[in-house]
Image (spheres, rainbow, N blue to C red):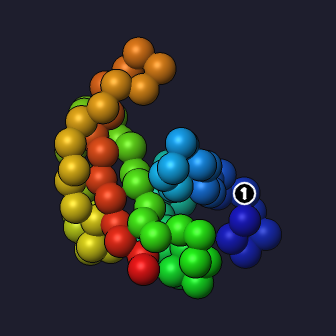
């Protein structure tokens, strides 16, 4: 929620030993993504259980500048539930 309006959903999901962060925003709220992601990263930094956060993005995603600004590094590609994803990781500890 932002100023009382629904802008999307997201959060952390534990995948094995890794904490994956996902964020899906309405198109009219795309400009809020970096600010919301930073709030999530701040939460992860404060939680000793989360030494790093992973992000999975479809290969069709071309604009990855927000992940770079957060400090995330590309660590490879994976197949999840039959679909290919680009995998990024951000150290939080």
Identify the residue at image location x=69%, y=70%. 2
Residue at 62% from the left image edge and 57% from the top image edge: 11
- Residue under label 1, please give it: 6
Q: Give above or below for 50 relative to 14.
A: below
Residue beneath the point at 42% across and 76% down: 92
Residue 58 x/y as whole percent: 33, 34
Specify the farthest residue to the right: 4
Q: Quadrant of the N terminus?
A: bottom right
Q: Residues within 10 Å of mark 1 (few under 14, many from 20)?
A: few
Which image quadrant for residue 34?
A: bottom left
Q: Where does residue 81 sit, x and y in percent of width and height?
A: 47, 20
Q: x and y percent of residue 39 in the render?
A: 56, 77
Classify the position of the C terminus by image quarter: bottom left
Q: Residue furthest top?
A: 82
Residue at image point 32% right, 59% down: 89
Helix, strand or loop status at disc 1: loop
Residue in the foreground of this view, choosing between 33 and 43: 43
Pinpoint residue 54: horizontal percent, then vertical percent.
41, 54
Left or right of 50, for residue 67 = left
Q: Is residue 33 visible?
A: yes
6 vs 51, left or right, is right
**Front residue (pair 20, 61):** 20
In this orientation, which residue lies closer to the viewer: 51 or 13? 51
């Amino acid at each position: 929620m932002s100023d009382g309006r629904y802008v999307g959903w997201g959060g952390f999901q534990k995948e094995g030993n890794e904490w994956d962060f996902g964020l899906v925003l309405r198109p009219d709220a795309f400009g809020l993504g970096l600010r919301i992601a930073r709030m999530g990263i701040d939460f992860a930094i404060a939680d000793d259980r989360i030494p790093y956060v992973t992000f999975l993005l479809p290969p069709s995603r071309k604009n990855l500048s927000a992940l770079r600004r957060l400090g995330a590094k590309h660590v490879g590609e994976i197949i999840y539930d039959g679909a290919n994803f680009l995998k990024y990781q951000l150290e939080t500890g």
